[in-house]
Amino acid sequence: MSLPETLITGGAGFLGSHLCDRLLEEGHRVCCMDNFITGSHANVSHLIDHPNFRLIERDITRYIQVDQPLGYILHFACPASPSDYLKYPIQTLKAGALGTHNALGLAKSKGARFLLASTSEVYGDPLVHPQSETYRGNVDPTGCRGVYDESKRFAEAMTMAYHRYHAVDTRIVRIFNTFGPRMRLDDGRVLPTFMRQAILGEPITVHGAGDQTRSFQYIDDTVEGIYRLLVSEITEPVNIGNPDEISILEVTREIIALTGSTSEIVFEPMPADSPKMRQPDIALAQSLLDWEPSISRKEGLRRTIDHVRKHMDRLRDNVR
Ligand code: UDP
């Protein structure tokens, strides 16, 4: 019988593709599954010839069958940027509900360990600051962002039900804002949008007065935290995020300075339902996983800006 594989749903997305890289480095045989509504072939094209990698195009909200034995399933498939999940509200709900159910059913039948990519969005627009895993959140189920928030809350409930009722070996990671190479420049998220605007000298579109806060973690730290949780024995949800909180206006100024941009800042209306603040309490990850972020926001921004510039140069060269 062949060695068990690790299945990564959403493996061609931003987080998923970095996890494919890391698990291959750790010696896993990786099966990457994606339906490519928000993921891209470019994110995994460097892996296509890797002997331990295979790519399957499939929608996990339909029944999924994998013939090989599976040791791990990492369930990352879901539109994850606000503009994506507002564009694909039903698919987003289905990825969290039907997709999670299918992935858990597969984990149960294969005896695989299952890791759910959950999110700081389960805390909604938080009334407690910073957010620890014990906070139950402030989510409006019928608000615009409810499609994402509630699908992830349901996914967590489903994961715990499979854990308690079917004894599936499960992990839940609550991921806070993550950035880095391979984010789509048009995914609408704040950092790639501002970087693109700053590099092109276009106006930088700050929502509201820019006094809302976020805490941004660099992708390598996120991947390290997820990997440590995967190989741990912790079945309760764990926050993985960088507690270094900053207002959107301040991060705009950092990006302008780092790119040497001449862009002006323009203020636009705040999108409905957008959380006013977000900062992870990472005491649990520090004590149980001996994990904390090691890459500063400035260093992460420098690396990502470098990547964005190269990507934009390539796009320009292809157009010429
Ligand atoms: N934002 C902004 N301008 C943009 C895009 C986003 O000011 O062009 C703000 C957005 O309103 C929010 C924050 O940046 O307050 C982070 O937004 P993002 O879409 O990156 O993700 P979120 O953390 O809200 O899920």
Image (spheres, rainbow, N blue to C red):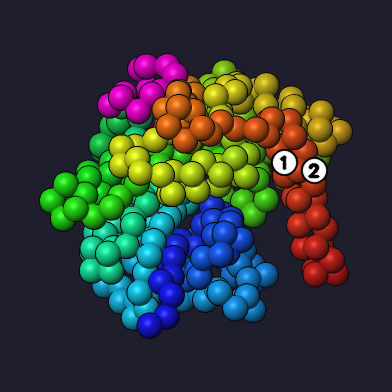
Choose top left, top right, bottom left or bottom right for residue 200. top right
Q: Residue at x 43, y 49 (%)?
A: 230
Q: Which secondary structure lies at badge 1?
A: helix
Amino acid type shown at disc 1: Met
Q: Are marks 2 and 1 in contact (CB under 8 Å)?
A: yes
| Quarter that holds the N terminus | bottom left
192 or 143, which lies in front?
192
Q: Is residue 232 left or right of residue 290?
A: left
Residue 77 magenta-highlighted: no
Residue 172 x, y percent position in the rendering: 35, 44
271 or 122, which lies in front?
122
Amino acid type shown at disc 2: Ile
Q: Residue at x 62, y 29 (%)?
A: 206
Q: Is residue 36 visible?
A: no
Residue 3 x, y percent position in the rendering: 43, 75
Question: What residue sits right under mark 2 in the picture?
Answer: 199
Q: Residue at x 35, y 40 (%)?
A: 234
Residue 128 magenta-highlighted: yes
